[in-house]
Amino acid sequence: MEGPAKKRRLLFLHADTRNPTTQRRTRSKSLDSKVRRHLMVDIGMSRRKPSKAPQFVTFVWSLAETSGALSSTGQGEHSTSRDVDHLQVPVKDLVVPETAAQYTALYTAMPPILNALSVFEKEWGEDWFSAYGFTLIMVAGRNAMGSTCSTNTFWFPFAFRKSAFLHHYQQIFTSPNVLIPLYRRSARELRSLALERSLKTIQCVESRLSSSDASNATSDSVLHAVLALVCYNFTSLDFDQAMIHVKGMWIVVAARGGISTLEANQDLMLMISWVDITAALLHDTKPLFPLSAPMASPSVFRDSGLETLPAPLLSVINDESTQNTRFMNVISSIGDLNAQNTRFMNVMSCIGDLNALAALVRFELATKGNAIWDDEEQMGFLVNPVTHQLLDQPLRSKPVTRWDIISEALRLGAMIWIIWVKRRCRSYPGTAEARISTLLKVLSSKSNAEHVWNSPDLRLVRLWLLVLCSISEPSDKDLATSMEMIASEMKEPRSVLWVEIMAGIRQMPWVDIFEPPCVKLGQRLLKDYLGAPI
């Protein structure tokens, strides 16, 4: 006799699997009620009728195009497939008054004025990326208000091609006179709308997954919807939930027959690999998916690897009179290759790739200027292959040998370098703080400093790592630690000047965006630690 049917739990939400009876309700009814009211307050606010006075930024649309856009808005989960070019509003029809007088004149002279958020709600409620879009608008508005832009965001370039919502309102992201008033007056409503849209998307995904038709439950549209949820989680800085969704995608792909089923849709595979690498970098875990074919062989890495190692590391490897060469001869013999030595060689190859990438970035900066940092897609194609290889290395609980310590320090340093560049491109929502703390522990050991970094070239590599830690937004405690170690290298008996250190570490993977914070670092070292000319 069959037992009672079990309640189906949401696969893509946090749940206490250890105690299924408490997944949906707490033991206290009063506490449960408080939690429910707290969660629904933002959604409730967004559903209230707007006051008669204009509360939000208003857009002036031509009446014909507005009615055409509204009538062509599709319903259901396939609404993103509609003709986005037909829906896109020309620049001339997007008017944002800059002064109260202009606003009054436009308001009285042109009747078809729509509340911006009302337009968002009515037209784009079924768009997969609407939750991500609302959150991105909010972040962009906050950045537009400040003198310096926050890099804690995730700019997903493919969303602007896949989402009719983002394609339609793309002009907003380059219009501070729209973003700032929208953020000031409507940040709470944007956040509420994003939350509501994400919950609806989850419900749609769960409905599909419960389908008896396996092809329907594991279709490309399900994967696209979960991708959109991951982007929303990244932008709202909910990294744990993002990882749950990435693992959910892996389950869906496995259920449909494995990664080979995505070979016919390389565009989808590219997007999955993109967010998978970001999630793995945030959590310092191995990527779940293989590297997408379009990212696997960029031309910049065709002749890189060990051939393009920076001079200090190449000198260490090629020095015939040191123990390093004997070590390299051992690991070069086929019989002695093992996981540890393979890891070391892979990390060294990644550093060579990073050096080649740094040279390309310097060239692009010289020819195109800072515009390269606005091309997140191109930079992602260059950086993500190295990131994937670094994250996909065999795991070790603790470095044991001298070369374990060097390879782990280089791996951590390379990832701090990558996070720096990704944040500059607005494509990484996290920070490097955890890796900085781990790397400083490896570098701060007195015995390591004496017995591991015991040659001029390796001391230069160590200084490069310490400077990277110091300029990558460390905690106050870690910044003090790294600066103390740099200062100790500059004092007697070596008496190295700061300009000499900078000349040396520029031989390692280096890009021009490191220079301004290094100037401030040198000035602070002089003031707080050395008290002498740098």
Image (spheres, grey):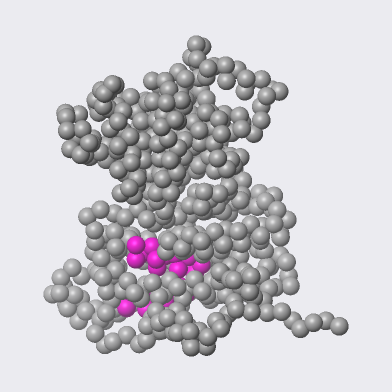
User: In the image, residue 131 lies at what x, y percent?
Assistant: 45, 68
User: In the image, residue 218 lies at what x, y percent?
Assistant: 67, 64
Residue at the (31%, 33%) spot, across then down: 486
Q: Nearer the viewer, residue 7 or 206?
A: 7
| Chain part drawn in magenta | 114-139
Quadrant where the C terminus lies? top left
As drawn, 231 above or below 511: below
| Residue 447 appears in the picture as rendered | yes
Q: Name the main secondary structure of what is drawn in magenta.
A: helix
Q: Nearer the viewer, residue 18 or 267?
A: 18
Q: Is residue 367 magenta?
A: no
User: In the image, residue 434 lies at what x, y percent?
Assistant: 43, 49
Q: Is residue 115 magenta?
A: yes
| Residue 473 appears in the picture as rendered | no
Residue at the (67%, 76%) spot, across then down: 8
Q: Nearer the viewer, residue 278 or 197?
A: 278
Residue found at the far left of this picture: 101
Q: Is residue 241 left or right of residue 290?
A: left
